[in-house]
Image (cartoon, grey):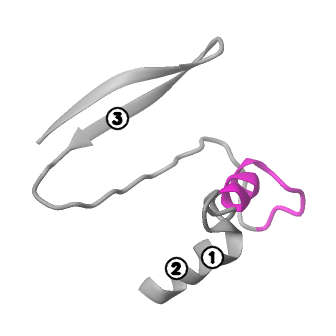
């Protein structure tokens, strides 16, 4: 298992991206970290809230309801 740190270029911005591969188990894990992204008590929609909404949109095949149903069945 090895980790590779390489920047992901989006326009003129470079986002640090850590890729770590381990072929022992078929598991996918993703973690998004946003610096200075607000708090739980913010009254205005911010970056974290937008990201959370995007992650709940589901897939093209299943849509948001089908995606949520599949997540609930695995909880």
Q: Position of residue 30 (x, y in %)?
A: 42, 52
Q: Mark 1 near mark 2, Cβ–Cβ under 8 Å?
A: yes
Sequence-first disc among 2 and 3: 3
Q: Residues within 10 Å of mark 1 (few under 14, many from 20)?
A: some
Q: Position of residue 21 (x, y in %)?
A: 21, 43
**Residue position for label 2:** 70
Query: Which mark is nearer the camera, 1 or 3?
Result: 1
**Residue position for label 3:** 18
Q: Is residue 60 or residue 35 the one in the foreground?
A: 60
Q: Position of residue 57 (x, y in %)?
A: 69, 62
Q: Residues within 10 Å of mark 3 (few under 14, many from 20)?
A: few
**Is any part of residue 75 visible from this angle?**
no
| Residue lying at the far front of the rendered structure | 61
Q: Position of residue 38 (x, y in %)?
A: 73, 52
> Count the marks: how many?
3
Task: Report the side of 7 relative to 72 (left or right).
Answer: left
Disc 3 element: strand
C-alpha span from label 1 to label 2: 6 Å
Disc 1 element: helix
Magenta region, residue range: 41-54
Q: Residue at x 15, y 48 (%)?
A: 22
Magenta stretch: includes residue 44:
yes
Label annotation for residue 66: 1
Task: Report the side of 29 relative to 61 (left or right).
Answer: left
Is 36 placed above or below 8 here? below
Magenta stretch: includes residue 32:
no
């Amino acid at each position: 298992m090895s980790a590779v740190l390489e920047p992901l270029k989006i326009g003129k911005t470079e986002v640090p991206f850590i890729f770590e591969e381990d072929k022992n188990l078929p598991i996918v894990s993703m973690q998004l970290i946003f610096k200075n992204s607000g708090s739980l008590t913010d009254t205005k929609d911010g970056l974290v809230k937008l990201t959370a909404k995007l992650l709940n949109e589901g897939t093209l095949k299943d849509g948001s309801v089908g995606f949520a149903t599949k997540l609930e069945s695995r909880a």
